[in-house]
Image: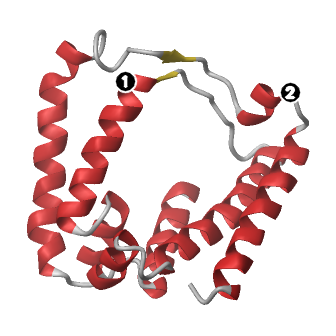
Amino acid sequence: MLGLLFSIMFGFFLQKGGATDYHVITGQMLLTDFTVLKLMLSAVIVGMIGFHLLKHFGYVQSHAAEGSIGSNVIGGLIFGVGFALLGYCPGTVAGAVGKGAFDALFSGMIGLLIGAGFFAEIYPQVKTCVLAWGKLPAVTVPEFLNLNLWIVIILMEAFMIGFLVLLEYFGL
């Protein structure tokens, strides 16, 4: 229930922040409108602290998973091409459908379903070769850096807040 509640809140804030607007998203792609970047950085800033507080009080657990260069490259290419062609990512397409955008409903949601079906079909053939190439360990950033979790959080929060301040200072 907590996940559903936070998902609904996130979608609400995506819509209110303008991230479900096609022109805002294409402006981000053209580096002329940084609304989406500001919104997502703000969400990461709040979410990072919120998640670790929930973890501290025992409401959630974190599970680091192994990754691979192959899966990141392939996934990034598919995500990027879809994002560039449609002007929505999976999260913003759902938000745009929620506010009544027909382009998101027909091309976005249908594209998501076709893409998920296609991936499910080819996954058995690519999981051990392409997607497994360049294995990455299941390690968190604090473990990788050998630093205390809260030191990493404070440093990352300071960097992200500083970056947002710079964007505002330069009028971006």
Residue 119 shown left or right of residue 17 in the figure:
left
Residue at 70% x, 64% y is 45
Quarter of the figure that contains the C terminus: bottom right
Residue at 55% x, 64% y is 6
The percent coordinates of residue 120 (x first, y second) are 18, 29
Amino acid at the residue labelled 1: Gly
Disc 1, SS: helix
Amino acid at the residue labelled 2: Asn
Residue 167 shown left or right of residue 84 in the figure:
right
Residue 60 marker: none
Q: Nearer the viewer, residue 55 or 40?
A: 40
Residue at 21% x, 84% y is 100
Residue at 55% x, 75% y is 39
Residue 113 shown left or right of residue 137 in the figure:
left
Residue 14 shown left or right of residue 167 in the figure:
left
The percent coordinates of residue 107 (x first, y second) are 10, 65
Distance between mark 2 and mark 1 Cα atoms: 26 Å
Quadrant hosting residue 94? bottom left
**Residue corresponding to mark 2:** 146
Q: Residue furthest top?
A: 128
Quadrant hosting residue 20? bottom left
The percent coordinates of residue 7 (x first, y second) are 48, 63
Q: Residues within 10 Å of mark 2 (few under 14, many from 20)?
A: few
Residue 116 versus residue 139 in the image, above or below:
below
**Residue corresponding to mark 1:** 70
Q: Residues within 10 Å of mark 1 (few under 14, many from 20)?
A: some
Q: Earlier in the sequence, mark 2 or mark 1?
A: 1
